[in-house]
Image (cartoon, grey):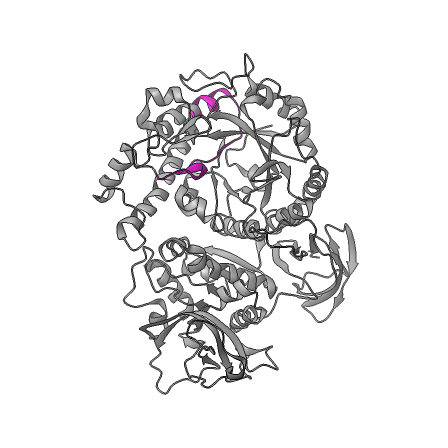
Amino acid sequence: MMPHSDHSWLRSSLVMIMTLRESDAASWDTEEMADFAKSFSLDALGFSVGGIMAFYPTDIPLHPRAAALGERDLAAEMIASLARRGIRPIARIDPSMASRALYAERPEWFVQDKAGAPVEVHGHFVTCPNGGYYNDFMIRVVEEILARYPFDGLWANAAQFSPWHTPQCHCGVCQQKFRARTGRPIPDEDWDSDVWRRYNEWRYECIAEWNARVQAAKTRVRPSCAWMPLSQVAESWDHSRVGGWDLDYTEPHQDGIVLEAQRRYANMFWPGLEARYMRSLAPEKGGGITTSYFLPWWRFYRVPIAENRMWAGQIMAQGVMPWIHVTGYQQEQFDHRGLDGLRALFARFDRNRPTYMEAASAAQVALVYSRHSLDNFGHKDPAARYLDHFRGAYNAMMDQRLPFDILSGNRLTAETLANYKAVVLPNAACLSDAACAALETYVRNGGHLVSTYRSGDFDETGAPRETTLLGRLTGAKATGVTWKNLRAAYAAIRDPSSPLLAGFDGTDLLPVAGDITFVRTGDQPAIAAPLTLVPPVEGEVGSGISVPEFNRIDHVTDYPMILDRRVGEGRIVHFPWQPDLIGFRYGFRDLFRLLANAIKQAEGWRDIVTVEGPGLIDLSVMEKSDRLVVSLVNFSAPGSFNTGQRRIIEELIPLHDLEITVDVPSSFTRERVRLVFAEREIPVTRLDGSRIRFTLPRLEAMETIEMLFG
């Protein structure tokens, strides 16, 4: 198998990461493991090689070999077994911990807590990303591995600050480096402090610097090997924030993108979120989203196959490859029940790669995800202050069946934004000057912007703007008054004929809760709003409850709950409250519809796909030169009691007889479309020159409809 210096194999490869434990070294059957990989239709298998311990005969002092390794060269054996089956090898390294013996010799390489003590995990000590272990020792490990073995990929686990939920580092190297950068000592957590926010950003910068060093070492020794460190986006903020993982910072220093979606307490749409983010951030780079066969707290216990089908399916629907992580397979106690179903799913993907690979999104809508808002507006409670807004907007797209992309708030340009009929800012509070300028150019040149709550009110560091993004676009100014923690409030429908309020026949109001930030619009004369505030109907302020006999609306204000303005050739629809967050928390479909209505007011809007029928569905549309690909991922699952975590999905509810209408190019002249998962064709009805209609008889976990041109 010839190496590809451009790493193009990553764009279309099914990959498994297999963690070896120290006790595996003596009994690991490389032929059995290669057969196991082959049974999953894999193109590449990653396995543990070095870092915490070596699974090969290392010559680096104090790089401990696995105790049971003996004279074996497990790396060489595994590579040979994989090569016989045409499977590429990927080296898994882990720099997060090292031995007591190395600590005794080089204690300055290790994390120290505030009291100056080392931090122990599993009998090892946690290492510091700024210290010599990462920047000297691990660089030598990488160089040794790549000089000896023809690995096609290099993958890093837990390369971060505070791995395994360990404390913040106060080692001498961190203290000296941060003081040199800022002139200040390492602070305690205080999100109102500029120094703390600078420290938080510094952690991301440090991890990016280490990635650059590994990339340079890899390039010196084996440039054909792809460097692809693990990272995460959004849902696992409690892990990635303290770890210093920000894909925007590290992406320039890696050959492939690997994001992890293994923490099963996260929302069910996390894999699709990461796949959308990865695809828009670096479309030219391959990689994948790593999901787990197991539950993270029980690493030998399988995730139900229904969930893994939905979990992996939403990745593939975005034209991104699903990766799978397995641990403990060769030990005596292991849950085998999910393997056959997962094999079948990967075999299905394998047979249909041309359908998904090298396709571009046809979405007309982009959601902006802002990590700076998550940190510098989210503060100690980023879920409540930022992420639930983004989750709500994501849910609205699914609920209203709108194909969409995700853009990084840190990389917005007028050129990228111009690809979309509508751009959505779900409380993207902290945006850079460059991002605000790009958004302003987009709108003034004819773009359509939908924003909520405090979007664009602060710069990326969290400092308040003298002129907010809303102010730049409309002249509106904040009054300095915010009504917080509303309950039992409403928005009165003042103009039922407004397209923004389509679909609300039979109601005079919509539910309102959370916070409202008040602005002066300066309209002369004032523009009547189609939706205005009704103050809370409650007996005691903040209770949300009133005595039934006194439960009545006494006052409807004129304060607009929608600011709808033309700006240059474009338009902004701004909600000065939190319909996205409230929709997410309470499951209000009306608020999801409200957001979708705002999006659909974009100039020239026409749904490229409509899906009629029940269920919660993630819809995506991808296009290639010779085909249009519509994927539906079924999120409809029966409920369960509240376990304190997001429930495990044991089964999905099949959906039946979904009526689908698609805008197709004139080059589509066929009378049938192909169902990829059902493996058959179904007839279509042509409605006019550009639209076809067909019935999807059954949707289980996922279905993809392929429309070939010509």
Tell me where residue 83 appears, x and y as whole percent: 62, 25
Query: Do we see residue 604 in this rendering?
Result: no
Q: Nearer the viewer, residue 591 or 674?
A: 591
Tell me where residue 94 appears, x and y as whole percent: 46, 30
With respect to residue 401, does 260 lie above or below? above
Name the residue: 34% across, 58% down.
434
Query: Do we see residue 423 in this rendering?
Result: yes
Say which quadrant the C terminus sits in.
Answer: bottom right
Q: Nearer the viewer, residue 125 or 684?
A: 125
Residue at the far bottom in the pictured view = 525
With respect to residue 147, does 434 lie above or below? below
Residue 161 counted in the magenta span: yes
With respect to residue 78, does 327 lie above or below? below
Tell me where residue 65 appears, x and y as whole percent: 49, 18
Q: Nearer the viewer, residue 698 or 27?
A: 27
Q: What stretch is highlighted in magenta?
A: 142-168
Residue at the far top in the pictured view = 71
Say which quadrant the N terminus sits in.
Answer: top right
Which image quarter: residue 205?
A: top left
Tell me where residue 28 appears, x and y as whole percent: 62, 21
Name the residue: 66% across, 29% down.
333
